[in-house]
Image: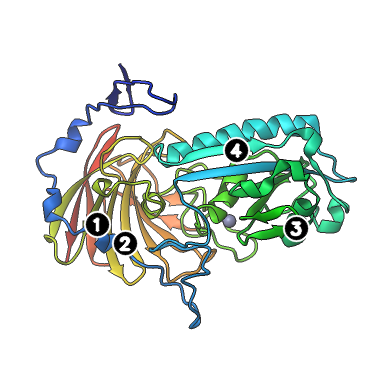
Amino acid sequence: MACVAGMCLLAIVTKTPTVLSAKSVADPLSRDRRITQRARLAPVDSCRSSDATPTNGMDLSQTRTASLGFPRPTTFGSPASLNIAVLPLTFSDLPYRDSDHTALQAAMREFKRYFEAMSYGKAAITYQVVALADAVRMPDTARSYGAFGEYIDLGRVVQESLNNASPTLKLSSYDMVALEIARNDSVKFWPGAYTNSIETPNGRVGGSVLAGGWQGANWRAIAHEVGHVWLALEDLYDHSPPPQYDGTFWEYDLMNSFRGSAPELTSWHRFLLGWLDDAQVRCISEATSRKTTHYLSAITDRNALPKMVAKSLSPGRTLVLESRRNRGYDKLDDSVLVYIVDSTRRSGDGPIEAKAELTLNKGRKPRIDRYVIPVGSSIRVEGVTIRLIASSKWGDLVEVVQS
Ligand SMILES: [Zn+2]
């Protein structure tokens, strides 16, 4: 019996070593008498808001490759599994080395660990790092593709690398392919995602990502880009040049910043992906009591406790509360994070906006960045007052009053 993350786990190794059957002894705060019973909350479906990004009259229901709402895009596979090939590219002016390959294998182990943690074990990740001898010899120089500048010719790199890959690799049998260029600090291109499928002489490949250079063997860069293709997630940062990673959401969420200190995926993303059970989502609406009280278990902890409180504000806009803790992949001050998912804003236009970090720590200073996130024990957001009542190491008790 091991006690971690507020849960005493009776671990029984079943068919695969990663599957644990857990008997939990939860945080006493999660059984507080003030908590509003589930039966008195709104149905979870009332929180499944659609994506309201303007489409200029076009019907994107069959072609949309990224979204912040429901239903999820259908152009790729399922968030329940990913089988990915990882293909090194070598150029005459930027050779791929043995040391790059060793680092890439380590990065992919982290990549797998990250998504298994974010999905609470609901996503099965398999990957194959192609042998160094099968690295693709690219027909042109890295410079000619624009690898030394900020914007590489992604479409050309994807097409020419897949055209020149060995047929014995059977790349079309994978869900997608991650392309990797050697680590080199002078190679400054931004990693990219190619969300369309690609026809090759050896079959169709479902999608591709490209990373490397200054972000060589960085699992976070690969995972961010794969998040666009596999999971149809949007960019949360501000695309307007130069990229502002503290645009509207500080460093929260890997889809916001792959270099930040809070890469745990938000509860909203996990809800979109089916990685939260309905029992972990607490929805409120005008139809529920004016005052409700909720326990939020830290999103980083793998358990069956509630992870998100949400209220639909208007079509495509949702108020969300979640508990963040300084563990897992996050390095931050503990708080209840209050934010608005605003899908009327486009991907790359700050579609999630932090409203507050709630804490009972009176000494904590507001987070001052380009964007200021208020800090305190309560906040009023769009007619909703949210008050942090109590906190433990494992989660928070919040009171929500709708006016
Ligand atoms: Zn991105």
Amino acid at circle 4: Tyr
Q: Is residue 381 visible?
A: no
What's the CA distance linking mark 2 and mark 1?
7 Å
Residue at 38% in and 21% down: 13
For the residue carrying disc 1, how many other residues have a C-alpha within 10 Å: few (<14), some (14-19), or many (20+)? some
When the figure is inspected, residue 153 is found, relative to residue 39, above or below; the finding is: below
Residue type, label 3: Gln
* Secondary structure state at the residue bearing disc 2: loop
Looking at the image, which residue is at 18% across and 31% down? 28
The residue under label 3 is: 159
Callout 3: 10 Å neighbours few (<14), some, many (20+)?
Answer: some
Q: CA distance from mark 1 to mark 3?
A: 42 Å
Q: Which of pointers 1 and 3 lies earlier in the amino acid sequence?
A: 1
Q: Which residue is mark 2?
A: 48
Q: How is the image coloured?
A: rainbow
Viewer-closest of 10 and 390: 10
Marker disc for residue 44: 1
Q: Is residue 155 left or right of residue 197?
A: right
